[in-house]
Image (cartoon, helix red, strand yellow):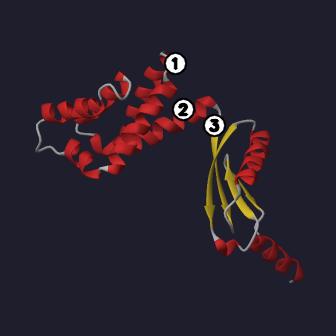
Amino acid sequence: MTDTAKEYAAALYMLAAEEELTKTVSDGLKIVSAAMRETPEYLDFLSSPNIPVRERLSAVDKAFSGTVHEYVLSFLKLLCEKNHARLLHKCIADYEDMRHINDGIVTANVVSAVPLKKAEKEQLKIKLEKLTNKTVLLNCYVNRSILGGMIVHVDGKVFDGSLRRRLHDIKEVIK
């Protein structure tokens, strides 16, 4: 099923890219995603084969017409018509992956022992952007088990500056 989601996402991305609307479509998809996460039963409704397609399409119109770009609206309707509404979140994730790749954006997952302050996040972001030559989006998590420092996963690389790792390295040297 993931190939199907990728195909839908790629078709939407190509259409949006042709019109230079990738960001606009992305913003619309975020609105839809938030609505579906807020009210999960709505996605159940759109996915239900027991509800006539015209009712599901009408519900999509009522919920999102005038709120999202027409490409996003048509995309939602297509998923409903083809009984693939359950793939929506995967389609959105695949679309965002394509947009990030084409726009030179990478996500950095940062794990630290304590929450990072705003200034620390900004400094880290700047350093990672210099390192990768890409725009970096930070996802920060706290895991006290690393004891101190941080672990950064970005662009397929891992930078482990955790205290736990340093202690492990010292232990190996002593052996």
Compute the Cα span from label 1 to label 2.
Answer: 11 Å
Compute the Cα span from label 2 to label 3.
Answer: 8 Å
Query: Which of marks 3 and 2 precedes in the sequence?
Result: 2
Determine if residue 17 is in view: yes
Q: Quadrant of the C terminus?
A: bottom right
Residue 22 horizontal/vertical position (percent): 50, 26
Query: Which of marks 3 and 1 precedes in the sequence?
Result: 1
Question: At numbered mark 1, what does the secondary structure look like: helix, strand or loop?
Answer: loop
Question: At numbered mark 3, what does the secondary structure look like: helix, strand or loop?
Answer: strand
Image marks 2 and 3: residues in contact by CB distance under 8 Å: yes
Image marks 1 and 2: residues in contact by CB distance under 8 Å: no
136 vs 97, left or right, is right
Question: At numbered mark 2, what does the secondary structure look like: helix, strand or loop?
Answer: helix
Image marks 1 and 3: residues in contact by CB distance under 8 Å: no
Label 2: which residue? Answer: 99
Residue type, numbered disc 2: Arg
The image shows a total of numbered marks equal to 3
168 vs 118, left or right, is right
- Decide: is 10 above or below 117: above
Residue 53 horizontal/vertical position (percent): 15, 34
Residue 90 horizontal/vertical position (percent): 40, 44
Residue type, numbered disc 1: Glu
Most extreme residue toward the top, as rendered? 19
**Quadrant in the rendering for residue 141:** bottom right
Q: Residue at x 29, y 51 (%)?
A: 40
Q: Neighbour class for label 3 at 10 Å: few (<14), some, many (≥20)? A: some
Most extreme residue toward the front, as rendered? 118
Q: Tag on residue 20? A: 1
160 vs 74, left or right, is right
Most extreme residue toward the bottom, as rendered? 175
